Image (cartoon, grey):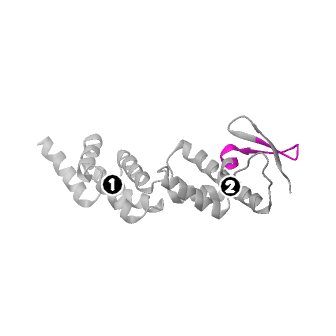
């Protein structure tokens, strides 16, 4: 059985491992700690299997972390990224669970942020619900996110004030997913302001 004869600290949190006096591998420091690789330890089959598992897990977390650097992703979107990166399903599931426990993957937060962004871009409640459903969010989470938004009629009124009142604006609002009641309220308020 090979024995660890030296551990040398490298760059970027990596450890160079020597087996029986010869360079073997450079491993992430967190993997070395989780597997318990220390000088004088023999590496048997079970510890090598554990090392392989931890390397897959570390790779999955690295891929997920890189994806989350630029923007929040839903659990479904992040799982798809891990699958495209050929991350083993077990490692992907474990890394997703770890990121959820850490609060880095939170579908409720992401759903709310997307709903606010869509509302700011001039979409009505139905269009927002539809987009969130396309994004793989739970309908209940989508309903909660929409309920937390500014009332639809107020958002529609801003669009009417910007575009003017009339049938073209009414069609525009309907195409953007605003409800009939919100459109009527916004157009009625705009007419009331001009009178």
Secondary structure mostly seen in magenta is: strand
Which quadrant of the figure contains the C terminus? top left
- The stretch in magenta equals 16-32
At 44% from the left edge and 56% from the top edge, which residue is drawn?
107
At 19% from the left edge and 53% from the top edge, which residue is drawn?
185
Residue 130 colored in magenta in the image: no
Foreground pick, 29 / 1: 1
Residue that badge 1 annotates: 124
Q: Could you say where residue 50 lies in the image, as x and y percent from the top left?
A: 71, 59
Residue 108, can we see it?
Answer: yes
Which quadrant of the figure contains the N terminus? bottom right
Distance Cα–Cα, label 1 vs label 2: 46 Å
Q: Could you say where residue 124 lies in the image, as x and y percent from the top left?
A: 33, 54
At 37% from the left edge and 60% from the top edge, which residue is drawn?
142
Residue that badge 2 annotates: 54
Question: Which numbered dot is residue 38?
Answer: none
Q: Could you say where residue 60 lies in the image, as x and y percent from the top left?
A: 64, 53
Q: Please identify the quarter of the rendering in which residue 121 is found.
A: top left
Element type where label 1 sits in the image = loop
At 49% from the left edge and 55% from the top edge, which residue is drawn?
100
Q: Earlier in the sequence, mark 1 or mark 2?
A: 2
Q: Residue furthest left?
A: 195
Marks 1 and 2: which is nearer the front?
A: 2
Foreground pick, 3 / 53: 3
């Amino acid at each position: 059985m090979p024995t660890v004869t030296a551990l040398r600290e490298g760059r970027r949190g990596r450890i160079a491992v020597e087996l029986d006096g010869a360079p073997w591998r450079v491993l992430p420091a967190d993997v070395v700690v989780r597997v318990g690789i220390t000088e004088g330890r023999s590496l048997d089959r079970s510890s090598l299997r554990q090392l392989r598992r931890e390397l897959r897990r570390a790779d999955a977390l690295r891929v997920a972390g890189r994806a989350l650097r630029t923007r929040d992703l839903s659990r479904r979107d992040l799982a798809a990224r891990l699958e495209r990166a050929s991350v083993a399903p077990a490692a992907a599931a474990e890394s997703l669970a770890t990121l959820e426990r850490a609060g880095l993957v939170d579908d409720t937060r992401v759903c709310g942020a997307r709903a606010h962004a869509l509302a700011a871009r001039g979409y009505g409640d139905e269009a927002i619900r539809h987009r969130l459903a396309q994004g793989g969010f739970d309908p209940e989470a989508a309903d909660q996110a929409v309920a937390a938004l500014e009332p639809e009629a107020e958002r529609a009124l801003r669009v009417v004030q910007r575009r003017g009142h009339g049938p073209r604006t009414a069609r525009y609002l309907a195409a953007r997913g605003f409800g009939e009641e919100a459109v009527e309220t916004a157009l009625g308020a705009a007419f009331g302001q001009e009178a």
